[in-house]
Amino acid sequence: MITGTPKPIDEILEMIEPYDNIIVAGCHGCVTVCRVGGEKEVQVLSSTLRLAREAAGRPLTIKEVSLERQCDPEYVEQMRPYVGDFDAVVSIACGAGIQFLAEKFSATPLLPGINTGFLGVTERQGEWSERCQGCGDCVLHLTGGICPVTRCAKSLFHGPCGGSVNGICEVGKDTACGWQLIIDRLKKLGQMENYTKLKPYKGWDSSRDGGPRRIIREDMI
């Protein structure tokens, strides 16, 4: 799940200051799960912006929109009949969704209403933690299903550093040593032989060649 946090209202008000007629667009995907970009959040943000602008003596017209996903063209195209009638769009989807809207509607300013966080999981209600950095070269089969790139504070790829004490990372007492988690998991699975199979440092250039990554499935085209 892609996580995010709301931008401060003052920051959004500054972004929309030149405009009097906007769309606030939500997304029913990941940002709905972490409660920053769903239909309810569209309504709350829109109401807050209207009240703030009314208090400033500059009424604001807002169209509230909630797309199934802002990262898929079939849903984004639903906005095309009316998006040109508005001065700007405040999107409270993740950064990928915002950029996709900007590509599709290049004549309309796209403004981010949230700060995109990370690929994570729900620890409990209201708490999310990172699990994946999307590095493009997954080794979870060798590490007991625990990612060394994400779970190790230094993204070490060969084993723990000297700063780990009693399974706790040196960056803070609330941070478990990622490699201790991996070793404990491998022992539990009876797969400690995988520890010796781990690759050296990642060849980042193989997964990040200087531009945005792309996946093409010929069987789906």
Image (cartoon, rainbow, N blue to C red):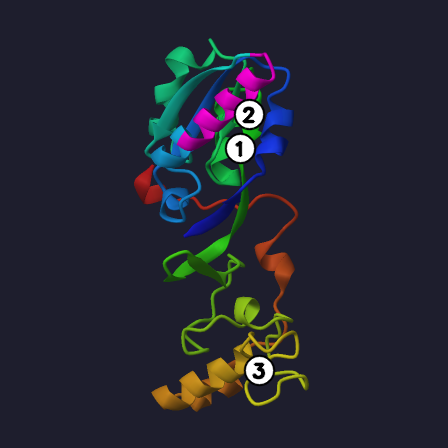
Q: Which residue is mark 2?
A: 110
Along the polypeptide, which appears first: circle 3 or circle 1?
Answer: 1
Circles 1 and 2, Cβ within 8 Å, touching? The answer is yes
Left or right of 125, for residue 202: right
Along the polypeptide, which appears first: circle 3 or circle 2?
Answer: 2
Q: Which residue is mark 1?
A: 99
Q: Is residue 148 visible?
A: yes
Quadrant of residue 107 within the rendered picture: top right
How many marks are shown on the rendered structure? 3
Q: Amino acid at mark 3?
A: Ile
Mark 2 Cα shell of 10 Å, populated few (<14), some (14-19), many (≥20):
many
Mark 3 Cα shell of 10 Å, populated few (<14), some (14-19), many (≥20):
some
Q: Residue at x 41, y 56 (%)?
A: 126
Quadrant of residue 55 within the rendered picture: top right
Q: Secondary structure at mark 1?
A: helix
Label annotation for residue 168: 3
Decide: is 4 above or below 153.
above
Give how far apart the Cα atoms at labels 1 and 2 are: 8 Å
- In magenta, the rendered stretch is 44-58
Task: Name the main secondary structure of what is drawn in magenta.
Answer: helix
Q: Is residue 69 visible?
A: no
Q: Position of residue 77 (x, y in %)?
A: 37, 22
Q: Amino acid at mark 1?
A: Gln
Q: Residue at x 59, y 75 (%)?
A: 157
Q: Residue at x 55, y 25 (%)?
A: 110
Give how far apart the Cα atoms at labels 3 and 2 are: 42 Å
Q: Residue furthest top?
A: 85
Q: Please say whether residue 96 is one of the residues in the magenta stretch.
A: no
Q: Position of residue 189 (x, y in %)?
A: 35, 86
Q: Amino acid at mark 2?
A: Leu
Give how far apart the Cα atoms at labels 3 and 1 are: 38 Å
